[in-house]
Image (cartoon, rainbow, N blue to C red):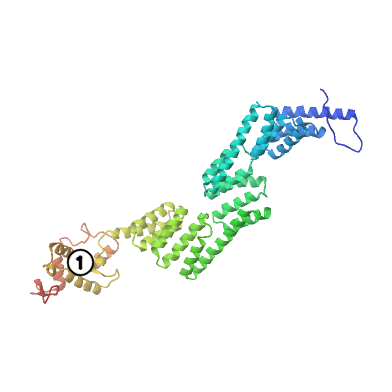
Amino acid sequence: MAAVDCDVPMESKPRSKTLVEDLGREAEIFKEKGNACYVKKDYSEALSYYTKAIDACPSNSSYYGNRAATLMMLGRFREALEDSQQAVRLDTLFMKGHLREGKCHLSLGNAMAANRCFQKVLELEPTNAQALLERKNAAAVLEYEKMAEFGFEKRDFRKVVYCMDRALDFAVACHRFRILKAECLALLGRYPDAQSVVSDILRMDSTNADALYVRGLCLYYEDCIDKAVQFFIQALRMAPDHKKAHSACRNAKALKAKKEEGNSAFKARDYEAAYKIYTDALTIDPNNIKTNAKVYCNRATAGAKLSKLAQAIEDCCSAIKLDESYIKAYLRRAQCYMDMEQYEEAVRDYDKVYHTENTKEHKQLLKHAQLALKKSKRKDYYKVLGVSKDATEDEIKKAYRKRALMHHPDRHSGSSAEVRKEEEQKFKEVGEAFTVLSDPKKKSRYDCGHELDNSGTGMGDFDANNIFKTFFGGPGNFSFETTSGPGNYYFQFS
């Protein structure tokens, strides 16, 4: 084996020519062993031999080039870049060295530097197929970077994730691209995916300020505000001028403080103040979906206490739009629907809650809403008589007397056929209502939502006139007569 002429480090005493030649031969032996290991894909062993070759002969460009190739196979691109750069410093015509330097730059996400390296190869060999291909890849990465930057400005985070995935096909070791992808995943609400990306980076580099910021962002958006602040502070220790971490930390602290202030006002029964404070909290950070969903629900609760039921329902809808799995918002909205007697909507919400969290409490709420809905579709006899649901027996009788006289057909005998028909129907309904509500058993069944019979009254062949005669007494013959002027009537039994 021919000796390799190597430069050796200057020492206090010059090495002899024989020693230099011996070191050169030894370096070649290490290189050959390294090559054999590389072919067998035993890259760790190959790395060891190439390092020994460099130690023996530190001025040989091919040794650095070989070690760079091995480091690349091990995914250690920053170290490989240093070796590639050293190789081309030692030999500016070393095309493989330029190619490897370019590949390292590209793998690390520096497409412009990579392009310069590939251009250098093409200056040495214009038809070099690998350099032409890699230059094309570098141009693609630059284009994806540009598209991602534009997408981020337009808040098109899905587009950014797509561009970064494509760029990472070439820039496999670029932390910057991965962190941008993770940040956009967090902004899209895909927190586990985002955390997975930055956790991998932090395992390799625990001081990466950008990764610490995105990790905090995920926690912040998951409403773990205290933990999020810790990560933001850690990121700022690593990079005091980190604008995003500073802004997020400020927002997190402000949002937490406002939310707690609103909760304190609510507990103190100052619902007006709580409502205003929650409103202020919603302006702090529109991007914090989970926390804002809770704030909307809290404001809905305060609104319900203030009898702002329509606004409370709207706030619950906003909370659900932000977080479709937010059970508390469904429950709050359902209660508001119940209070507004919008029973179908209440049943829909309680049904969703019950099928999501199958508990006895939720089942009972659903049954209660279903019963209210069933009742709402029947005639409301309390409304027919104009009495409350807790009216006494005397109040029911008085109400019947008033309504029966008001709607008796004889009183409207001089009216149009349409009016007579309408008043006759009302007279009949008043009789039905009195028949049910004046009978304790029927009233109890009616209040519980049970059907009384097929007609819903339990009166069989119902005759409103008979109820009227029975209630007012007398032999049963009566008439309404005009006293003086239209609309003035009295009735008499004969």
Q: How many labels does the image show?
A: 1
Residue sitting nearer the eye, 30 or 154: 154
Front in this rendered view, residue 198 or 12: 12
Side of 372 where 274 appears, left or right: right
Mark 1 closeness class: few <14, some 14–19, many ≥20 residues within 10 Å? many
Q: Is residue 370 left or right of 8 when viewed as pictured? A: left
Q: Where residue 296 sits in the image (x, y, percent)? A: 47, 60
Residue at point 39% right, 59% down?
334
- The residue where tag 1 is placed is 430
Q: Identify the element where label 1 is drawn.
A: helix
Quadrant of the snapshot with the N terminus = top right
- Closest to the observer: 145 or 23? 145
When the figure is inspected, residue 394 is found, relative to residue 62, above or below; the finding is below
Residue type, label 1: Val
Q: Is residue 173 above or below residue 382?
A: above
Percent x, y of residue 107: 64, 38
Q: Position of residue 53 (x, y in %)?
A: 79, 32
Pick whichever, 24 or 157, lies toward us.
Answer: 157
| Quadrant of the image occupied by residue 181 | top right
Residue 168 at least partly seen: no
Figure quadrant of residue 347: bottom left
Q: Is residue 476 left or right of residue 426?
A: left
* Residue 99 locus on image (x, y percent): 68, 32
